[in-house]
Amino acid sequence: MPRQFSYDLAFDRNLGWVTDWEQLALRGKRVAIAGMGGVGGTHLLTLARLGIGAFTIADPDVFELVNFNRQVGATLQTVGRAKAEVLEEMALAINPELRIRRFDAGVSPGNIDAFLAGADLFVDGFDFFAIDIRRLVFARAAELGIPAITAAPIGMGAAYLVFMPGQMTFEAYFRLEGQPETEQYLRFLAGLTPKGLHRRYLVDLARVDLAGGKGPSTVAACQLCGGVTAAAALKVLLRRGNVMPAPYHHHFDAYRDRLAVAWLPFGNAGPVQRLKLALGRRFISRLRSRSVPEPTAAARTPIEEILNLARWAPSRDNTQPWRFDIVAPETARMHILTDPSNVYEYRDCEPTWLAAGMLLETMRLAATGWQRTMAWQAPDPGANTILVHFSQDDRVSREKLFGVLTVRSVDRHAYRWRALTEAEKAALDLSLGDRLVVHWHATLRERWRLARIGALATAIRLRCPEAFAIRQRIVDWVHPLSAEGIPAGTLPLDPVTLRGMRWAMQNWRQASLFNRLGGTGLSAAQMDYVPILASSALFDIRLKGPTAMQEDRRAQLLDAGGCLQRFWLTATQLGLAMQPLLAIVCLAHYGATRTPFTQERGLLARSEKLAGLFDRAIGAAPSEVVFLGRVGEPFARLPTHRSVRRPIAPAG
C-alpha cells in the first residue's frame, strides 16, 4: 500500500472506460450536491471514486438511527454528527486532494447562488419531500446554464431525469407551480415514475404517508441512484454519449428487472399523465383512511427485544391468547388466556395450549439472538401462568431458525402441485424430535379424501351460529395487514364469493340465506377442495407411543407445541408454505365423542359422519391427532395480506 496519495494510481482502473485526458478533465470539474443523506452521500462517494476533483455539498441534518437502512454515512460512530461533515471526511479518505466547500446550514433561498458558484453540474440529493427548495435550485441552475440531474430511490430501483440548459426545465416537466403540498409530492413522484414499475411489490401501503412527509426506502435503490447518476454525470461533464434529457424519463427497477425509458413531451401536463394523477389522488385519499403506523419504539432491554420478536408465534385465528409481565431483569411471566366457551377450543382448550408451546419455542429461539438460554416452569394444575427465565451465556450462538421467525405465516391458497422431496421430508421429520411423529397423506386419493372431510367441516362451520359469531370477530375486512384477526384477502375465495361472504357476515339471517343460495358449496370448493388437492402433501402429527395425554397434559401440550413450531419454521426455511387444518380435528372430535357443541339441529349428526370419514382417511381417531395440516411449495406471492401482531402489552 502506498503511503502517499497518487491521483493517477488511485483512478487508473477507470482508464479504458475513459481516456487519460478525460480522467484529467474530470479532475478539474466541480459538482454541487444538495443533501448528504440516502442518495446525496452515495452520489458524493461514487463521483469521488470517478475522479471528480471538486465538490460543493450541503446538508443541515445530523445522522440518526432511522438513517441506518440506507444512508452510507450512518453508523453508530456518526450518530449525532453533521452529515455534511461526516461525508466530507469519507470523501477525503478516498481522495485527500479534493476541494470541498461545505454548506452546513443547508441550501436556502438566500445562498443558492453561492452554492452553485463554479459548479459544472448540479446533482439533486434533497429529501424527496423538500419540494420548495428543490424547485428554486433547479430553476436557478437552468438560469445559470448548469446541467442538473435528479435521481430518486423508488422501491428497489432508480428513477432519474437529466435537465440540460436550453431544454425542458424542471418546472415545465413536473408542473408544480401553484399546487398544494400533497399535490406537488404526487406530481413529483408521477413525473419520476410514470410507468410505476415499483407499485406491484409495495407490500404495506400504510407506510406511505405523503402528508406526513414519510415513506419507505431501501439501500438498494440509493446505491442504484449513485450508479445511474455517475454514468449520466460522466456523459454530461465529458460531452459524450447520448444524454437523453427531459422530457425523457428513465426508471430502472432491479426487483422487476425492468427498464422504462419514455418521452413525455408535455411532462405532467400530457393527457395520460393527467389521468394517472387523477388515479393517484384517489389512491392518496384511500391512504388517508388507513392508520399510519408510528415507528416501533426501541426495546430497552434484551428481554423486551426477545418478547417483541416472540409475539410472532402462531395462534388460532391470530387471537394471540397471552400477555406478559416482566417480573425481573431476566424473568417474564406468561399469562395464557383460555376461552372454554369458544366452539373451537376443544379438549379443554387444547389449541391455546399448543399455541402457548409454540410461543415458548419462539421465545427460546429469539433468546439465542441475544446469547441467552431459556428455561420455563410448567404451570400448576388449574393455573394459567408460566414463569420464563433467561440466562446470559456467551457460548450460545443464534440458531438458524431465528431468521424465519417473522417470515413464517399461514398460506391458505393453492400450492404448486409437486411432491415433497425425500430430503424435505427427512428435515421435517427430524424437526419433531423424539416425542411426535408425522404421518404423510400425499397420494391423489388421500388428498381427495381429506378434501371431502375439509368441505364437510366447512359446511358445519358455516351453518353453526356459535362459529358465526367467532368469524364475525376475527375476519378483518378493512386491513390487509391485520393485528388482531385474519385479513379477508388471505381467504382463497374469488372476488364474487368474497363479496357475498362479506354481505353474509353482517348478521346470521343473511348468513343463513347465503348458505341456502349455494354459498356453502362455493366456499368449500375454494377453501377446501382446490387448496387441499393443490398441495404437495397433507400430514397429521401424533404423540409417539400408545399413551394418550392424561397426566401432565398441559405440559405435554406445551412441549408438543414447541415441536410443532420447529416443524413449521423448518418448512418455512425450506421454502415451503403451510396451513393448519385444526378445525377438522375439532369438529371430528365433537362427532367422535358425541359432544353437543351447537344449538343448530342436525350439525351433531354431521360431525359424527365427519368423525367416521376422518378415521378412515387419517387412519386414526381424532383423539390421537395433535395437529393436521397441508404443506407445499407456494406460488410466488407478495405478502400484501397477512396477520401481523399486536405490540407487546403487559398483563391485566
Image: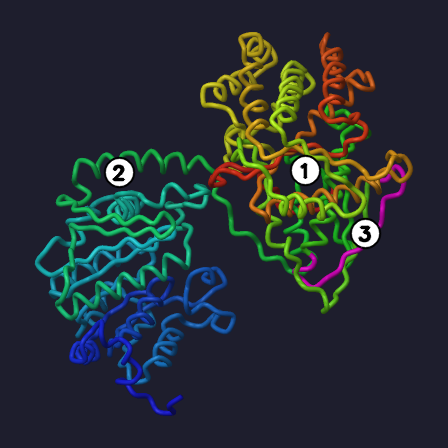
Dot 3 or dot 2: first in sequence order is: 2
Kind of residue at badge 2: Leu
Label at residue 376: 3
Tell whether position 372 is magenta: yes
Which range is magenta?
A: 367-383
Q: Are marks 3 and 2 in contact (CB under 8 Å)?
A: no
Name the residue rendered at 48%, 20% in the picture. 499
Q: Is residue 468 visible?
A: no
Say which quadrant the C terminus sits in.
top right
Say which residue label 1 marks. Answer: 315
Element assignment for label 1 = loop
Q: Is residue 48 above or below residue 235?
A: below
Element assignment for label 2 = helix
Q: Using residue 345 as the reference point, say whether residue 490 is left or right of it.
A: left
Kind of residue at badge 1: Ser
Say which residue label 2 marks. Answer: 277
Say which quadrant the N terminus sits in.
bottom left
| Residue 138 x/y as whole percent | 19, 59
Element assignment for label 3 = strand
Name the residue rendered at 20%, 36% in the picture. 272
Residue ranking furthest to the right = 551
Colouring scheme, one of rainbow, by chain, secondary structure, one colour: rainbow
Tell which of 531 and 171 is nearer to you. Answer: 531
Q: Quadrant of residue 127?
A: bottom left
* Circle 1 Cα neighbour tier, 10 Å, few/some/many (<14 / 14–19 / ≥20): some
Dot 3 or dot 1: first in sequence order is: 1
Name the residue rendered at 51%, 48% in the picture. 294
Q: Using residue 306 as the reference point, say whether residue 349 is left or right of it.
A: right
| Residue 228 x/y as whole percent | 27, 61
| Residue 415 x/y as whole percent | 53, 34
